[in-house]
Amino acid sequence: MTKRWSAAFALLTGAALLAAGASGMAEDAPHAFWGKPSVDGGKCCNSLAEVRENIDRINRDLVRLMAERQKYVAEAGRFKANPAAVSAPARVEQIIENVKALARQEGLSEAVAEKTFRAMISGFEDYEREVWAHKNAAGGAPAKTP
């Protein structure tokens, strides 16, 4: 599972970096304004369109992995006594420290990794609270107090 999440992390952070780099390029640039292709051993990219094709490919992988993560986030709600229990600051900090270590291993900016994951975690916490409320409103389980 660790290798799978490492791969997912590499995809997520690589896409963030590629997107950040591509966003400042001219829409109709006939050529690069500096440097030579450096991705994939210099095989990519000779055009902005090629960069974007690869970003789109990575985005598809990221969405697939996020959909898988969402299933586990929903599952976690079964173990939470109430919606307030969804937020677990100590767990978030543990995740961020792990992500930053992975970022260092993969050559990713730790700042990009941290910002990306904090945003993702926030979105998933909102989702988990929604699932929790829906399941309990539908009679999935009685609300409990901690």
Image (spheres, rainbow, N blue to C red):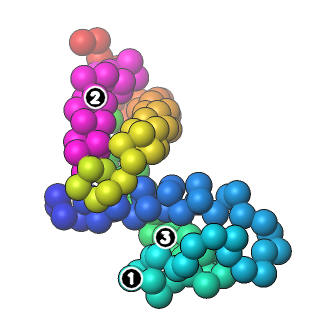
Q: Amino acid at mark 1?
A: Gly
Residue behind mark 1: 41
- Relative horizontal placement of residue 70, taking residue 146 as reference (left or right): right
Q: Is residue 9 part of the magenta span, yes or no? A: no
Local crowd at mark 2 within 10 Å, few (<14), some, or many (≥20)? few
Amino acid type, callout 3? Ile
* Secondary structure that dominates the magenta span: helix
Q: Quadrant of residue 42?
A: bottom left
Q: Which quadrant is home to the N terminus?
A: bottom left
Category of crowding for the residue at label 3, using alpha-carbon neighbours closer than 10 angstroms: few (below 14), some (14–19), many (at least 20): some
Q: Would residue 21 be found to the left or right of residue 92 on screen?
A: right
What range of the chain is rendered magenta? 81-102
Judging depth in this view, the residue of 21 and 1 nearest the camera is 21
Q: Which mark sits nearer the N-terminus, 1 or 2?
A: 1
| Closest to the observer, 43 or 100 | 43
Give yes or no for residue 101 being in the magenta stretch.
yes
Name the N-terminal-most of marks 2 and 3. 3
Quarter holding residue 124:
top left
| C-alpha distance separating marks 2 and 3 | 26 Å
**x and y percent of residue 132 in the render?**
41, 33
Confirm whether residue 67 shows in the render.
Answer: no
In terms of secondary structure, where does tag 1 sit? loop
Name which residue lies at 42% across and 39% down.
111
Residue assigned mark 2: 93
Residue 58: percent from left, percent from top: 49, 70
The answer to whether 115 is drawn above or below residue 16 in the figure is: above
Give residue 45's position: percent from left, percent from top.
56, 81
Q: Which part of the image, by quadrant, shows the C terminus?
A: top left
SS category of the residue bearing label 2: helix
Expressed as whole percent of the image width and height from the top left, the position of residue 88 reads: 30, 24
